[in-house]
Image: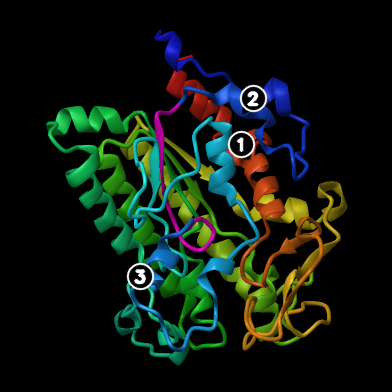
Amino acid sequence: MNPNHLCFPLALLSLFLFLSPNKASSLHKSHKGCFSKIYAFGDLYTDTGNAQALARHTVSATSNEPVNRLCDGSRVIDFVCEALSLPPLPPYKSTSSNFSLGVNFAIARSTALPMDYEDDIGVSHPLIRKEASLNLQTQVEWFEKFLQEVDCKGRNVSACKGELGNVLFWISAMGVNDYARTISSSVPLHGLTEMSIGSICKFIQTLLKSGAKYIVVQGLPPVGCLPLAMSSSPLHDRDKIGCAATANSAIMIHNEILQQKLANLKIKYPSSTILYADYWNAYLAILMNPKKYHFEEPFKACCGAGGGELNFNSDSLCGSKGTSTCNDPSKYINWDGIHLTEAMHQHVADLFLNQGFCRPSFDRLIENKSGM
C-alpha cells in the first residue's frame, strides 16, 4: 500500500462531535491524501461562482436575486474539501483558476431537466419559464469538455479513466429548482419526479462510464421548510413540523425513488462506491433540535424583508433595496429564505461525513478507497 495514500476513518475521532461554527478544520487531517481532487456538480447549494461568472456576460433584467448573495459563507462542498485537506474548489467558469486539485461545475438555479420539459408532460405554467436557467446537461457538457481540453489532454482513454478513479465526485441536491418552478402550478409531480431522477441517473452513468469510482449523491432537503415554500403555500398546507406539506411530500417521494435507482446502479457498477447523502434526515435532525446546533431561528430568514415569522418577501429578496441582514447568521438555518447559512451547511456536512447520514457511511467510502 502506498503510504502517501493512507487515510483513516473518522468514527473514533468524531462519532459524538458536533462542530461549532469555528471548528470545521479540526478533523480534516484524518482524510489527507485520500483523494487527489474533487469534482462537484449541482445547483444553488453547491455553486461557488459559476452563476456569478455567467451573469457578468448575460445579466437578466428581470432577476432580482443578486448572484453574490446566495449564502453568508461556505457551503457543504467547502467543508468536504477541508475534510480532505484540499483547497476550495474553483468554479469551472473562472478564467484564472488552477484546476489541478478539483473543479466545481455546479450552477445556481440549475435544473435537472431542460427548460422545455413541460412540453414532454403536456403542461405549461409561467413559473417554469420565470427565469432562464442552465441545467444538468450543461454541466455534463462542461465536464466532458474539461476532460478533453484539460484533465485528459495528451493521455489515452485508459490512463484518463485510471486517474478519475482517484477523484471524489460530489453531486449536490439536484432537482430542487425543478420543484420550485412548479409551486402552485398544475404540473403533475409524479411525471416530474420520474423525469428528474431519470436525468440525474443518466448523468451518474456518464460519470461511471468515464471512470468515476467514488460518488456521493445528495438527496433533496425538505424544501417545504424554507420560507420560499412556506410563504407561497396556504396555512392549512402544513405538516407536523410546521412546513409546507405538499412540497415536502413531493421531496419524500423523490428521495425514495432516487435511493431505489441508486441501488440499481450499485448492482450494475459493483466496482464503484456510490453513497446516498441523506439530506432530508440531516436537515430534520437539526430542525427538530435546533438548540443542540446553536440555532435560535429554525425558519426565519437572516437576510430579507417583511419581518414576521419568516422575514421573507419574494418580491424583495436579500440584497434588494429595503432588505436587511441579521447580526449573527450562525443562529439562523436560513440565509435568505431560499439558501442556507454557512452554519447550517457546516452542520449538514458534519452529519454527512462523521455522523452516519451517508449510506453506506462516508467512512466506508474512505475504507474502500484505502483498500482497508
Question: Which label sits on residue 134?
Answer: 3
Residue at figure coordinates x 57%, y 87% from the top left: 184
**Mark 2, other Cα within 10 Å: few <14 / some 14–19 / many ≥20:** many
Distance from label 1 to label 3 (Cα)?
Answer: 29 Å
Q: Amino acid at mark 1?
A: Leu
Q: Is residue 212 left or right of residue 89?
A: left
The quadrant holding residue 102 is top left
Q: Is residue 130 left or right of residue 119?
A: right
Between tags 2 and 3, which lies in front? 3
**Mark 3, other Cα within 10 Å: few <14 / some 14–19 / many ≥20:** some
Distance from label 2 to label 3 (Cα)?
Answer: 37 Å
Image marks 1 and 2: residues in contact by CB distance under 8 Å: yes
Q: Which residue is mark 2?
A: 10
Secondary structure mostly seen in magenta is: loop
Asked if one can make out residue 277 in the rendered structure from this viewpoint, the answer is: no
Q: Which residue is mark 1?
A: 353
